[in-house]
Image (cartoon, coloured by chain):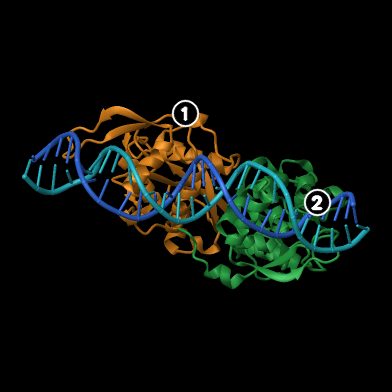
Chain colours: A green, B orange, C blue, D cyan
Amino acid sequence: MNTHVSVDCVVFGFENNELYALLVQRNSPKPSRNDLKLPGSLIYQNEDADLAAHRVLSELTGIRKMTLRQFKVFTSPLRTASEDDAKWLEYAYNDKIERLITIAYLYLTKINRKLNSVSKYATVEWMPVSQLPKMPFDHNLIVSDALEEIRNWVEKEPVLLFELLPTKFTASDLRHLYEAIYGRSYDVRNFHKKMMKMDYICPLEEKQEHVSHRAARFYKFDKVKYNKRTVGL
Amino acid sequence: MNTHVSVDCVVFGFENNELYALLVQRNSPKPSRNDLKLPGSLIYQNEDADLAAHRVLSELTGIRKMTLRQFKVFTSPLRTASEDDAKWLEYAYNDKIERLITIAYLYLTKINRKLNSVSKYATVEWMPVSQLPKMPFDHNLIVSDALEEIRNWVEKEPVLLFELLPTKFTASDLRHLYEAIYGRSYDVRNFHKKMMKMDYICPLEEKQEHVSHRAARFYKFDKVKYNKRTVGL
DNA sequence: TCAAAAGTGTTCGATATACACCCATGC
DNA sequence: GCATGGGTGTATATCGAACACTTTTGA
């Protein structure tokens, strides 16, 4: 059997109190706005899946060192059943692909980090996860599963939250990020207390400017203090 | 490239206050005790990985309905690099397998449930996870990762703990199970309180007999009460 | 002076931890 | 009667949840 293995990467960013996913437009004989999908690639002969996912994202973003998480494999024989998708596979890989399983990866990054200017894709864009288009294969399902996985991941490694926020952020930025990830709201006062217990979040003197309300204090994430914290076990 | 995809199943049981893994002996031209490995199989053409894992375990145990968890994919190009392993693959599948990636599954079951009398394996045996032999491919690594995964799984679905215990069990059985899974010890009194808060654990009138110390009470797991419990969110 | 968001403390219940002694049984 | 493991309660610290008003700023 002619089985192929790919990686697909769900990249989340955070802006306007909302999570965004990074989508690319697949090249195709007749490109259309309906061709947005997750960035991905077949795995090369001598690389493992982690490396393939790194390669895909390095090409896209220029970033070399990044923390990725493999979170699920999608193996349904029907996932390439749609005629459009089968045709596109044949076009893109110039090969008859009977069966394609994919290993899904999760990556969190600042949304305004600049992306590589050249890439193999016609378009690269951030879309709010609440308004994703219908995507090829099972990519919509992959994003849903990623949204569940993100909670497991940040619970183990809260540093990841700060990959999503700008270097300087306010308490309400962080709170809204928690709210987006956990799909619930947090009481402002209780959230402040919770935040103050994370002593790797350092208040700055700097505050917002030109806002039409009381200016919020900025905070920064202190990696050194974070690494020194004793992980509760 | 000729990539093959398999599933490998880590089956844990619990006995003598210790976790055991179910290993099979691979058939080979010259069988030896060193051929113990995880039960597994290539994925068939029209099945997805979940189904393949079910198939492997049904053949082995006769069980039809079971809860499995896909937990990680192993894709290193070097995982089949050992000469022995490469030879065995060729022998077992009668085909040249250049590259083999495997999807690992986790399953928890009672250790004394009787297994299918016929299977494709010469030997099927439970081994304490603390004394596993060196296994082919990366199967030792897969078991280690499974031991981490088990905690994530039972935290979401504590019912799984009772898949590992006999129908009637004592408080200290359950405590030792927690200790084996979490690799720490629990204070006896505090553990009792914790256990009493799980109201789906029901005390029975029955007690141990013929033990040379005070007889322990038996408890049973009540599935109905378990399903009724409101999951804290 | 108004609108809009920032910032701040106390109380309560639930949960986890620490800790020591008597009980039942078989030998 | 003694060795072995079973069974039990209290006190303390920590954590999360509920809850309302004042402050700052630009428009």
Badge 2 sits on which subunit?
A
Above or below, A54 relative to A148:
below
Residue count near mark 1 (Cα–Cα under 10 Å), binned few <14, some 14–19, many ≥20: some
Above or below, B67 relative to C20:
above
| D7 relative to B106 in the view: left or right | left
Of residues C12 and B209, the one nearer the viewer is C12
- The residues tagged by marks 1 and 2 sit, at their Cα atoms, a distance apart of 46 Å
Residue A162: x and y, percent? 66, 63
Residue beneath disc 1: B225
Above or below, A53 relative to B109:
below
Q: Secondary structure at mark 1?
A: helix
Number of the label disc, if any, that sits on residue A13: none
Q: Amino acid at mark 2?
A: Leu
Residue drawn at the location 66% of the way across and 53% of the way down:
A189
Residue B141 in view (yes/no)? yes
Residue count near mark 2 (Cα–Cα under 10 Å), binned few <14, some 14–19, many ≥20: many
Q: Secondary structure at mark 2?
A: strand
Residue A158: x and y, percent? 60, 60
* Count of number-bearing discs: 2
Of residues B212 and B92, the one nearer the viewer is B212
| B59 relative to B52 in the view: left or right | left
Of residues A208 and A153, the one nearer the viewer is A208
Residue B109: x and y, percent? 40, 39
The nearer-to-camera label among 1 and 2 is: 1
| B112 relative to A170 in the view: left or right | left
Residue beneath disc 2: A36
Residue drawn at the location 43% of the way across and 54% of the way down:
B143
Q: Amino acid at mark 1?
A: Lys
Of residues A126 and A168, the one nearer the viewer is A168
Quadrant hosting residue B139: bottom left
Residue A183: x and y, percent? 68, 45
